[in-house]
Each structure stands twice: as C-alpha cells, then as structure tokens.
Image: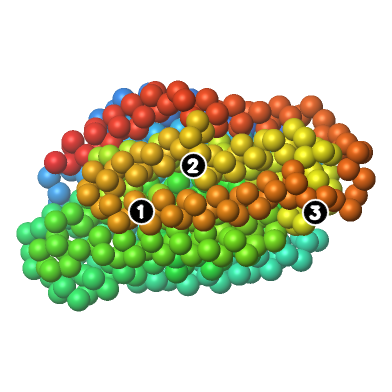
Amino acid sequence: MNFQFVNIALKNFVPETILIGTFIVALLADLILKRKMAVAVIVLLGICAAGWYVIPQTNMQLTYIFTGTYVYHPPVGMFTVDSLSAFFKLLLSLAGAIIVIYSMNSRELAEESSSHIGEYYALLTAMMVGMFLMAGVTDILMMYIALELVSISSYILTGFLKNYYRSAEAALKYVIFGAAASGLMLYGFSLLFGLTGTTNIFEINQYLSTHSVNTVMLLLSGVLIFAGFGYKISAVPFQFWTPDVYEGAPITITAFLSVASKAAGFIMFLRFLLITYPNITKDAGFEWNIILNVLCIATMTIGNMVAIQQTNMKRLLAYSSIAQAGYLLMGVVALSTQGVSAVMIYFVMYLFMNFGAFYVVQVIAEKIGSEEIEDFKGLAKRMPFLAAMITIFMMSLTGIPLTAGFIGKFFLFAAVLQRKMYWLVAIAALNSVIALYYYLKVIRAMYLDKSDEDETSSIPIGVTPVVLTLMMAIPTIVFGVWFTPIVNFAQKAVATFLGIQQ
C-alpha cells in the first residue's frame, strides 16, 4: 500500500471524514444518552467542524484524491478538492447548521417524533455526507452512489412524521419518482461507460474528443443523465414529486431540500456538463444548449403559472422553488465563467431568503394551526413582526431591488445577456412579474383582508423565533447592498476551476 497516497487523500478528505464520524457518534449518543438535545448539539458541532476544515480548501488548486486505475495523464481521481467544491461545501455547512437549529426549535418535530428524534439528526448528517461528496465527485459511478446516499436519507426524513398521513404519502411518492429517475440516470451512465470504457469524466472527455462514437447513443445517454439531474434540481418535467413532498415533509426538511439538496444537484450537474461534453456534441451536429434552454424556460414558466393557483403556503413555496430552479438554469445555459459564478452567487442569496420564508411559515403554522393562505388574513395585526418578515423574504424571492434576490437575479441576467440571449432574459423578466403576483396575494391577505378571528388579539411568538427570523432577514437585506465579497469569492472559485481545464 502506498501510505503517501493514503495520507494525501485523507488530508484532503477531512470534512467528509468528520461528517461520517458525526453520523456514527450521533447514532451512539441517541442509543446511549436518550437525550434529543445532546444528539442535536453533537450534529451541530460536527457540521460546524466540517465547515471549518473546508475553509483552507477555498484557496486550493484542483487536487485529485482517491486515484484508481485510470490511464489519464496526469493522473485523476474519483474526487476533486478545489475552490469550486469548497464554495458549495461551505454553503452546505451553513445550510445544515441552520436546519439543525431550526429543528431544535420545531414544535412539529417535538410533538410528532420525540421518541426517535435522534435518528432524525443522524439521517440529516448522512444526507450532508452525500452532498459533500456530490460537490467534488468526478466519477460517474460515484456520482450515482453519492446521489443515492442523499436520496435515501431524504426519503426517510420526508416520511419522518409517522402520525401524519401527508408525510407518509409524500415519502411514498418521493421514493417512486426517485427510483424512476435514478434508474434513468444509471442507464444513461451505463451507456456512456459502454461508449468510452471509463467512468471518470475527465477520461470520458478525452475519449470523446479523440474517438468517433455512435451519436444517437451518445445523445440518448445524455438525455437519460439529464433526466436524473433534472429530478434532483426539480426541473420540468421531472418536478412532479416536489409539491407533494414539500407539503408533506417536516418544514425543516422541506427547506433543506429546497436549498441544500438543490445546490448539491447543481454543482454535480455543472461539473459533469463542463468537463464531459464541451465542444463534443456540437461537432456531431447537436448542442446540449437546446435541451437546456427548453428545460430552463419550461421550469420557470410552469413553476410560476401553477404557483398562482395554490392555496397552501408550503405548496406555493414548492412551486416557487421549481421556478427558482428555472432561473438558476439560466446560469447553466450560459455555460461561461459568469454563468457558473452567477449560479453560486444566487444560491447564497437563495439560502437566506428561502430558509427565512419557510421558517416564518413554520412559526405561523404552529401558532394558528394552519398553512392555508386563507388563514393568513389579518395576520399583520395579530403577528406584525412575522408578517413584515415574510414580506421581505417574498420580495427578495421576486427580485425586488435592495434585497439579496435582486443581486442574485442581476448576475444571472447579466451572464445570459453577455451571451446575447435577450429573448431568455425577456422571458425570465416576465416570469418575475408573474411571481410578484402570487407573492402579493399572500401579502394582501395579511395586510388588507379581514380575518374571521379577533384581529385585535395579538399572538405572542417568543424571543427565539424573532432571533432566528432576523438571522435570515438581516443577510437578505444586507446582501442587497453589500455583496462584493460573495461575488469575488464565487468568481475566483470558477476562474480557478475553468482555468485548470482550459
């Protein structure tokens, strides 16, 4: 055994190792201590420690770990550690830590599943492990394994509320759709392996660049693989699972899936697309941009149009999340340094405004016992603080200036404009107007519509919800006017990654 190779690999695999250890310790702590708060603290510390060890990786050049029997020169591995993967790992660490804190203060989880809440935190950690792997994986077999680790954990967490029939229904639908999408992706990977004889995306690129392959089979494999990625990022027409899963899952898991799971799917999709296919299918008379453009437009349009019809807040935010995936695909369509960095910038902004929106919905639902928009009438008089906060988050999701969402969309639009795709920007802008309509529907219900309840009786919310809401609201406002460090970090990470490949 080459111990030098092992030392180098493990040295760069510390964050993932910490999360794996946290998962094991969380299971043992739940078994021995029987105290849910202890398990939550262990997981929170583990996620923070993993994020801390990611920080030195933000300045790393492209480094391969776990090299196998590949023939590519210079040698490549199953995973890469670079500034691009580090950016997303930090984002995932922040998302995981926030969700653990939210979960510790969730009455929904405390009432429904207090006897096995330790398993909840352990599964959340397992999901984090899979997402960390997705951020740096460069082998199609390991891509599938990492995706399945995330998917299986999320299936269980979606159905975690055993006494809640919608949770069980959501989990079942999630498993069915997930199995179908995974099967399509795996078959696409098998076709790609059959064409090239390798599972490493760098070697696949090299083979496709120097050899002639069956174009039909190459396109078929690509479409099947795109279907698997489309399912993970909730892109149309693979989004059918999203509304039911988001409505039935615990709100904490819904929020986590809407941001962290989607971010992991996007980084793996971007890495696969940028390395595997550039300038290959174009020479064969076909460009992936055609498929990406169709997916982008359909996702944002259908997500927004269906969101208009929703009466449940979680379902409205679910379709909003689908539309947000469409906006993010604009950066993928651009296929440029600016496009990829715009996706990264938007995810940072999206984390705060989307987590904030879901958390406010969670608190309101716990206080009034309903998630229906109809029951939000007159809420501004009974819960003025939360009404103001959800207004801020929804304006940010729309992309109103002086909010983080505006900055995110600005960079996405700029990346597409740089490619002179004016028609796509026009469609996206029109979709933003549609989104504003259904967000204003909620705001109108809170501020203008009269409730059947006594509007003069205020509903106390406590100090903790106020603090946790402000944790999301302050960055949503601040990053609307001060965003340079995030932009510089994202652009530097992408430039480093793409510069190595050119």
Which quadrant: the N terminus? top left
Q: In the picture shown, does residue 409 fall above or below 205?
A: above
Residue 312: x percent and y percent? 70, 59
Q: Earlier in the sequence, mark 1 or mark 2?
A: 2
**Residue in the image at 59% along x and 43% along y:** 394
Marks 3/2: CA–CA distance = 26 Å
Which one is in front in this view, the residue at disc 1 or the one at disc 2? 1
Secondary-structure class at tag 2: loop
Locate residue 381: give its quadrant: top right
Binning the other alpha carbons within 10 Å of mark 3 as few (below 14), some (14 to 19) or many (20 upward) gives many
Q: Nearer the viewer, residue 184 or 406?
A: 406
Residue 60: x percent and y percent? 29, 28
Residue type at the position of mark 1 = Ala
**Residue in the image at 15% along x and 51% along y:** 71
Q: In the picture shown, does residue 229 fall above or below 71?
A: below
Q: According to the image, label 3 marks what residue?
A: 375
Residue type at the position of mark 3 = Asp
Residue 456: x percent and y percent? 91, 38
Secondary-structure class at tag 1: helix
Q: According to the image, label 2 marks what residue?
A: 399
Q: Nearer the viewer, residue 36 or 104?
A: 104
Q: Which of 300 and 467 is in front in this view?
A: 300
Specify the label residue 59 is tagged with: none
**Residue in the image at 48% along x and 35% along y:** 401
* Horizontal side, residue 190 vs residue 14: left or right: left
Q: How is the image coloured?
A: rainbow
Circles 1 and 2 in contact, beta carbons < 8 Å: no
Residue type at the position of mark 2 = Gly
Which quadrant: the C terminus? top left
* Horizontal side, residue 433 vs residue 270: left or right: right
* Horizontal side, residue 482 vs residue 354: left or right: left
